[in-house]
Amino acid sequence: MAHILIVDDEINIRKLLREYAEFEGYEVTEAENGMEAVNLCHENDYDLIIMDVMMPRLDGYSACKEIHKTKNIPVIMLSARGEEYDKLFGFEIGVDDYVVKPFSPKELMARVKVVLKRNKSAAEAVQPDKYVFEGLEVDISGREVYVNGKKAAMTPKEYDLLFYLVKNKNIALTRDQLLEEVWGYDFFGDDRTVDTHIKMLRNSLGEYRKFIVTLRGMGYKFEAN
Amino acid sequence: MAHILIVDDEINIRKLLREYAEFEGYEVTEAENGMEAVNLCHENDYDLIIMDVMMPRLDGYSACKEIHKTKNIPVIMLSARGEEYDKLFGFEIGVDDYVVKPFSPKELMARVKVVLKRNKSAAEAVQPDKYVFEGLEVDISGREVYVNGKKAAMTPKEYDLLFYLVKNKNIALTRDQLLEEVWGYDFFGDDRTVDTHIKMLRNSLGEYRKFIVTLRGMGYKFEAN
DNA sequence: ATTTTTTTGTGCTAAAATGTTATAATGGTA
DNA sequence: TACCATTATAACATTTTAGCACAAAAAAAT
């Protein structure tokens, strides 16, 4: 999941933001001022920075400028109403969004999501998501599977399971891994559920069931070049 | 030369801006309020919009948002100091620059030049926005849909939904994605809303409803060559 | 080799989830 | 006000799923 750097001199704001961000599943690091933020950014990679404008040691604008000299990390600025907002208009310093204090944490989180998504799609835009294994075609983004040219009608779980297996082809996967990744971390069910769905998936794949290999005492693997 | 749309409710401002803009060699059209601007944009193509924030009938923010649903036209906002500038932070509404009243017309024209230049290169990479699927014609920039040659009368949401689906044809889209992209990230409503609009869209498409495929447990997809 | 134990595969079914449609409520506009 | 678009809610039919029981297969123990 994404890693967010929160930069504010007020500990209470940091705490509040951390709470919300962690609730959304983000990893959080804090910095007290711009100087600290710049140093942290030199040593680590973050996916997004939430930064206050007004801070001791090094203000938000300058920190932002400094960081963007070496790394291209999206920034959301926090500013008290009345601060020089026109400076913020951020083409030259690279601000991605802007929230005025006092802000609603919920809205801020919505913006975080948007900015992360915008930058994600740019980063991983060209990810191969169409695979062909002999007569088996797997089109992940189109959510389609063809068996010998004929479209396979599968259930949602079958798709999800197959896609995960294919994305991790030739890698041994335990049932627990599959449950966590395909069913979700909040699924507290039986291991054997995986078996059942593997069974159904194998049926759907017909002769290409051969690609799904049982790893006794462990789990399953999609085995293909 | 570039065609500029000036949107302000004060006739004196419009006159002033027109004078300067025409001196620079731009073609100028005026609108008195946001609503008028939106309508003009549906019918014509402009290279840039200079828009006041505070206007009767439809304010600048909303007009901007509305226009950007269908066209990608750069906008420079005019705002009196003290207006809610935070809303302006305009990535989500697509504001390219921002000038505070009272402004220097000379400076404004300098910004117009910059924005036009920036967007010229982007505009040259034209993407196809007219699609034909059998008897279904979808003209995105013209915001028109023809079913067997007959113009379909659809609601705004239907257009937006269809256009987004078509732009992402053959890609599986979740309801959340659709809500976020078509309704906006600030829509905190029910997932089922998508279903309702899909239903209505299907009705509008008549026999070509077949292109809209339900992906059980996931969402929808526009499936066509 | 044979038996025992462990693990995996399969058919089945009640329960849960989902999609569709119809209808009602809401909200904005002329 | 009346109208229309949008959104929410509810009922319904259908599909999907989880997990069990038992069969089959593989591995381990004897």
Image: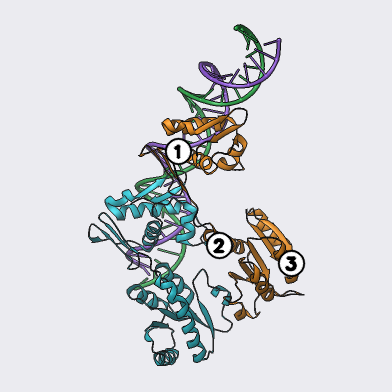
Chain colours: A orange, B cyan, C green, D purple
The chain identifier of the residue carrying mark 2 reads A
The chain identifier of the residue carrying mark 3 reads A
Residue type (three-letter) at the residue carrying disc 2: Asn
Q: Position of residue B159 (x, y in %)?
A: 36, 61
Residue type (three-letter) at the residue carrying disc 1: Thr
Are dots 3 and 2 in contact, CB under 8 Å? no
Relative to B214, residue B27 above or below: below
Q: Nearest the camera: A173 or A223?
A: A223
Q: Which residue is mark 3?
A: A39
Q: Which residue is mark 1?
A: A155
Mark sitting on residue B169: none
Instruction: Using a 10 Å C-alpha cutoff, classify the residue at mark 2 as few (fewer than 14 neighbours), some (14 to 19) or many (20 or more).
Output: some
Q: CA distance from mark 3 to mark 2?
A: 23 Å
Q: Position of residue B26 (x, y in %)?
A: 39, 87
Tell me which label, 1 or 3, sits earlier in the chain: 3
The chain identifier of the residue carrying mark 1 reads A
Q: Nearest the camera: B140 or A121?
A: A121
Left or right? Give the position of A218 relative to B14: right
Residue B58 in sight here: no
Q: CA distance from mark 1 to mark 2?
A: 32 Å
Considering the numbered disc 2 on the image, is that residue within a helix, a strand or a loop?
helix
Considering the numbered disc 3 on the image, is that residue within a helix, a strand or a loop?
helix
Instruction: Using a 10 Å C-alpha cutoff, classify the residue at mark 1 as few (fewer than 14 neighbours), some (14 to 19) or many (20 or more).
Output: some
Q: Which residue is mark 2?
A: A119
